[in-house]
Amino acid sequence: MQGMVVYPTAGYLVVAIEAARRRAEQADIEICQYELREVIVGSALVLSDDTDAETTINLRPYTEGTRGSSDVWDEFRVCSWTSKRGWTEHCTGQVRVRSDPKQQSAAISSPFDTQIAYTKAQIARIQKSATHHLDMSHMYQVLSDLGAGYGPIFQDIGNCYSSPHNSFGDLHVRDTRSVMPKGFEPPLTIHPSFLHGLLHFAWPLLGQGLGRMDLDTLYMPTMIKRVTVGLNVPTKAGQFLKGYCSGSLSLPSPEPTKFDLFATEEGSTEPIITIDGLVMTPLRNPDTRREDTHKLCYKIDWHPLAEVENTVEGDIQIRRCATENLDLDYIHKDKDANTNEQTEQKGKVSVRDFGDIDFSQKQLVLLQTEATSLRYLTEDGFEGLKTALLKAQTVLWVYWADSPDAQMTVGLTRTLRSETLARIATLGLCPVDIETPEKSIQAAISALWPTDGKQPSKDLEFQAKGSELFVQRIVEDGVANSFVHNETHDMTISTQPFRQLGRRFKIQIRNPGALDSLHLVNDNPLPLGKDQIELRVKVSGLNFKDIVVSMGQLAQSYLGIEYSGIVSNIGSNVKNFKIGQRVMAMPEGCFSTYARCSATSAAEIPANMSFEVAASVPVVFCTACYSLFGLGQLQAGERVLIHAGAGGVGQAAIMLAQTIGADIFVTVGSLHKKQFLMSQYDIPESRIFYSRDASFARSIRRATGDFGVDVIVNSLAGDLFARDLGVSRAPFEHNVNFSSVDLTKVGKFKPQLMKRLLGDVGRLLSERSVHPVRPLSVYRISEIEKAFRTLQNGKSMGKIVVVPHEGDQVKAVAPKTSPTLLRPDASYILVGGAGGLGRSIAKWMSSKGAKTIIPVSRQATIDEKVRSLIDTVAPLGVQIIVKACNVSSQGSVEACTVFYQQISLCRATFMRITEPVHVRELITAPTASAP
């Protein structure tokens, strides 16, 4: 994995199974099936040749409550020790062995029979939907290119079919014994490579499930809800099971994704292996080491002719060039044109029509002026020019390089050369750079028709710059190659200004657990939702949940859950906010330049409150309010224990509990925090306890006369959580509730509750019943790593917020272009759009953000193929308007222009008619603009 040898996730499961097997055999328990649950992979076990790693598994009865232990479930922990890192815990979970699940009462339908019926339905559904065949060698190659290299022993699946939500195929047993030292392999219930192979059926879905691997992000298993393994797992090389997988990929940004998998014997509906609730978590920018830029793009560059010719020193000096045998004819569009300038230098000049000259085997020089371009040629003139170009032995066509019309000359001559192999050369003159064009023309003539014994030039496109003649050469396009590299690879992180014109940033952590890998990446958002608002971020609040996510202990794809800012955009259904309004809100990710949230997760900032203070309010007060009154049902006179009282949530809970007259007990982690609470909130010293060990439980029992408390607000981790059971007023059997609070889930699934919580908090602040938590520590966006570390060490009080300032320098990746290339608020005219190429272009435009496409053709017929196009893009919110228009007729174009303008006026959002997209070469192209 990314160049490292990583112990597979299935290996932890097999270790737990084998430990459970030995324990069951010692207890003389009959085994029919193994079951694991709540498996968490917290840290990868990386193996290396230069460091020995000692691994251990700890198996003990699972603790249930404060006193008893389970008779069925064992808790397992897989750890390792190395001299460099010391002890590391890699995987935890619970495991048990089961007896025969078929031994159920015959009077009722057993769970086993229900499982069989469910599996049968699942197999039928998956096989019906997964119709795209996937090349396994291609899949494993894509994974290898991304950094997940599976050797032959671990490439276990084959004959795989997939869809965006399902996959199935063959799960093969590999000959693992052949690669073991001396061919020895201990007997196992299931081999890790075989079990790990079942997880591979998630890869086709992560690759979007369409028979190809559209995958640019690596995923790692981080959590499994439940695993069952039967005893009849095949173990001989060549045997196989049928593997099945279901799940849904979160697009467009990679997020933790859940899958359900199972394996059966072929033709059977009885699952031998099941894996429910497998969570695959994306690795964020796993490798930012810049690879060498590939030489994929090239461009044409002009080089001096003298530098590219293979010239050698001659033996004879040429003193005179004979030109008597060269025919000179001057051809002009206007035969009556003034020829005095030519006659002064050359004598008599004859101006003749194309049709008057026999060009066979002639050397022809065409002099083109601004008045004599292809744009103004008559039909007869074009026919004469065509005859001259095709019959002449060699042609030199001289044109003014700065004239747009003259570029038609280059296009025409290139076409003739490629189709007829005619020897037609061009010479572009730049009036700014050249004073005497005669010298440049003579140099080109000498290159084409040398009289000194040299071979004629193979170059047929010249350009005069100053006194030199230039020819074209293909060279590497470094700018384009860098662009392609930056768009398709993780880039080197560099220090850049946070404020960049037209660029949106958001924060990510490259290596979870390493705060020094916090950096900013490009933010390319989807269109704003109808019920959303977007804010230009002024201040972001930092919460301990952000620390947990950055440490890789919580599968979440974003950092930042509260902020304050100015409304920059609103959805079509939003009525209670307006652009420019000051707002505090709770989004999914806000360490960024812009952030979005549901309108129900936002509230207006009071007039006398700063952005810094506003960003410290939503999470702590809404969490405390919902915990105490929504879930805890705290009443006046009841006792409440508030852990981490000096923290943000702790202070908010103290103030809210004081408003109703509750009896408050708190815990703190230091003497300084204790003194702070005594001075700021008048908490008696006898009600403040030390939270770094379990002594607070006994102290609170004594302080309450062994009566305990009614409500506990707990933000502590580890074994101290269990001690709260001994502090509560009633034993567990006396109606004690355990509840968790995650405001991001409240905002997502209970938006009206979130709106009410914000409203209640705003009212309390306005009435000055409570005040913002203290102290408020402000960090610049350039100090974000320092802010994270300050909160992580647990020594801070109050609230930490992060503020971007002008001139702040941050670690960020190079900019990328937005995948949405086209504007959704513009209408695009597609000339010739009803044809095959036009329909393909319309589909591509739809995938790149266009929402209104107007194919124009002479007939505007909506046939079966056009109807299919309309139906295909309709789910993307794209409107296809087919319009008849003859683009070679000025009247037809003008009529269409009026139609386009009417479309713009009728749209709720004013739309801009873009310049037309041409599907085929046309004589006249329409131009249209909004009125």
Image (spheres, rainbow, N blue to C red):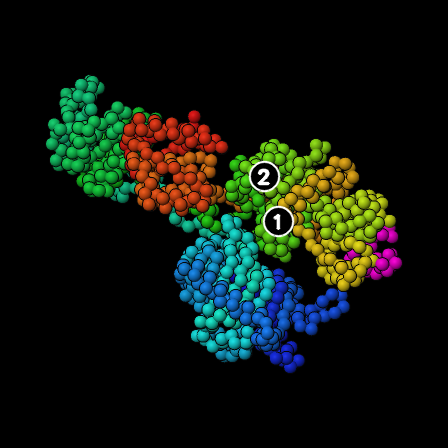
Over which residues does the magenta segment extend? 685-707
Mark closest to the chain's N terminus, 2 or 1: 2
| Horizontal arrangement in the rendering, residue 149 relative to residue 448 (left or right) | right
Magenta stretch: includes residue 690 = yes
Q: Is residue 672 above or below residue 571?
A: below
Residue under label 1, please give it: 749
Residue under label 2, please give it: 533
Viewer-proximal residue, 614 or 872?
872
Residue 73 percent coordinates (x, y): 66, 70
Residue in the picture at 58% in, 35% down = 568
Q: Is residue 93 above or below residue 882?
A: below
Viewer-proximal residue, 203 or 127?
127
| Horizontal arrangement in the rendering, residue 826 relative to residue 493 (left or right) | left
Quadrant assignment, res 353: top left
Residue in the picture at 44% in, 54% down = 214
On the question of residue 91 being in view, the answer is: no
* Residue sitting at the far front: 107
Viewer-proximal residue, 275 or 811?
275
Magenta stretch: includes residue 307 = no
Q: Looking at the picture, which amino acid does disc 1 mark? A: Phe
Residue in the picture at 49% in, 64% down = 122
Quadrant assignment, res 873: top left
On the question of residue 878 being in view, the answer is: yes
